Image (spheres, helix red, strand yellow):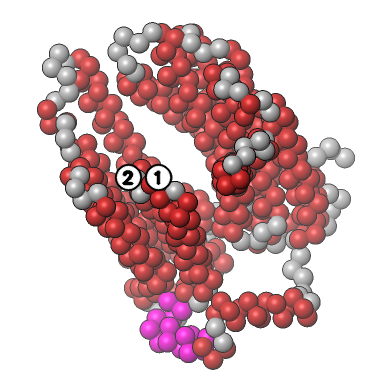
Amino acid sequence: MTFLPIVTRELIEASRRRGTYWLRVVAAAAGLGIGGFVLLLARKGAHPGEIGMYLFVPLAIACFIYTHLMGVVRTADCLSEEKREGTLGLLFLTDLKGYDIVLGKLAATSLNAFYGMLALFPVMAIPLLAGGVAIGDFWRVVLVSTNTLFLSLAIGMFCSSISRDERRAMVLAFVMLFVFTAGFPILGALMCQSAQNWTFFPAFLVLSPGYDGFGAFEGIRKVGSPFTYWKLSVILIHALSWMFLALACFIVPRTWQDKARSAAAQKRFDKMNRIEQGSPGAQRIRRRRLLDLNPFYWLAARDGKRNAAIWGFLGIGAVIWFIGLMVSPTEWRDPVAYVWTALIVHTVLKLWIATESSRRFSYDRQSGALELLLATPLSVKEILRGQWLALERKFALPMLVVLIVDFVFLMAQRHETSAVYVWVAGMVVFVADMLALAWVGMWRGLNSRRANRAALAAIARLLIFPWLIWIVFSIAISVSASTNPNGAPDWWDGHFPLVTWVVIALGVNLLFGLPAIRGLQTQFRTVATTRFETKGRQGS
């Protein structure tokens, strides 16, 4: 019998996908783009050694971010998808073991992620030719990047093994990775500051990939005691990755079946359901009210747990701010704290609405529920209205709360004209992005087999693409300024960069939002009744 047959099968299938080859091209092109942008912004007259370090550090940061995110994205749904489709149990009817399946899925999902990282390494080696970057720094960055990618893949695999829902697996994986990367260091800093004793602070750092990333640079490691445990940290994180993989191998054979709840478990479930959904009488009243308003509205909004999650997130943010104001009021009443709070909350809500809007149509089309709905008197217009009402029910009030907080921050900086313009622009773009993400997410979800892939497509179009356009435009202005004896044009000074960003963001929203609305209104029935192609045909 072939050793690890699933690995062989998955690698053969992955080799047939076009994305396996395109990802490394895109990663290398992104690295070259970042390097070119950094070189344009480099200080004139800088020494070649300084330029080499200017170029190496941003590329290393980009590689660290890539390895943190890509592993989770690739593996968080690989096993949970098999559970939902019922194919995981068929594999266990053979002689395959848990490690066969876990390692096979790991090989298939990690191939693209590893190739993308590998494509960045030659670009990162370019600064070695300019000088200023030691060979040790380069190899330590390579080692930490590979180790971090392995940890990200292992955490995603573990979360997928204990989950059936793809969004729950993805969120859990990102939360776990955040806890290891930033949660432990932040907790350690708060505890040590409270106790006025920093002796045990390194103990909170050794399990953080972020600590390894900082310690990869010789200049930072010379700071002293905080980075004396760098080698130990690399070893522990590598061992932690193998531990998560071993847990996934142990858990998968025991979680693929639907098991009946015990009496005690059923009692706990009923109790939690009563807390989250209300009493049976309240549930019937809510069901009748939603059904009378729009049947699809009830279908999309009947789960109250998802509405509670967003308020839980905002509540945690409020608690953090309250603690911060109590402990360090001066530092928290600072424009930097205002901006970072807004950026984090805006980004999380945008990502949230992208995943939520794409989820319903993707699942319902895959299960055939949309075909059944279209066979009823329910019209496409009513289905779209029900989905929109469900999104409005979940996000409208939180959006209003966030805008009120933004206005409070704006009033705190009302004496600075430039800050007022920035806050107004951010609030306008926030509302426009939320509306556009809802429509584009619905359209991409209707056209995608996987809800996560649909959400990523919407995010790439509406959140990443505008920034790329703005960066390219800024590079063009910088190049023009460098070749022009008079420097940058006069109209580029002042608020023009901010206005350009707003115009680009709103223009991209219209560019993708209007076709999504038109597609949903005119092609919904055709797309919803078309079967997805099989995996084999997609891979050929």
Q: In the image, is 344 to the left or to the right of 168?
A: left
Q: Position of residue 310 (x, y in %)?
A: 47, 64
Inter-mark Cα distance, 2 to 1: 9 Å
Q: Say the numbered circle drawn on residue 515.
A: none
Q: Place residue 147 in its image quadrant.
A: top right
Name above or below for residue 114 compared with residue 516: above
Name above or below for residue 104 compared with residue 298: above
Q: Residue at x 17, y 23 (%)?
A: 488
What kind of residue is marked 1?
Glu
Q: Residue at x 42, y 13 (%)?
A: 50
Task: Residue under label 2, please give it.
Answer: 335
Residue 296 belongs to the span the image colors magenta = yes
Residue in front for this viewpoint, 458 or 474: 474
Q: Place residue 210 in its image quadrant.
A: top right
Name above or below for residue 277 compared with residue 507: below
Magenta stretch bounds = 283-298
Sort mark 2 into few (<14), some (14-19) or many (20+) by Cα contacts within 10 Å.
some
Residue in front for this viewpoint, 371 or 130: 130
Task: Residue under label 1, please give it.
Answer: 331
Q: Position of residue 540 (x, y in %)?
A: 58, 41
Q: In the image, is 96 to the left or to the right of 440?
A: right
Work out which residue is located at the far front of the displayed protein and give it. 196
What kind of residue is marked 2?
Pro
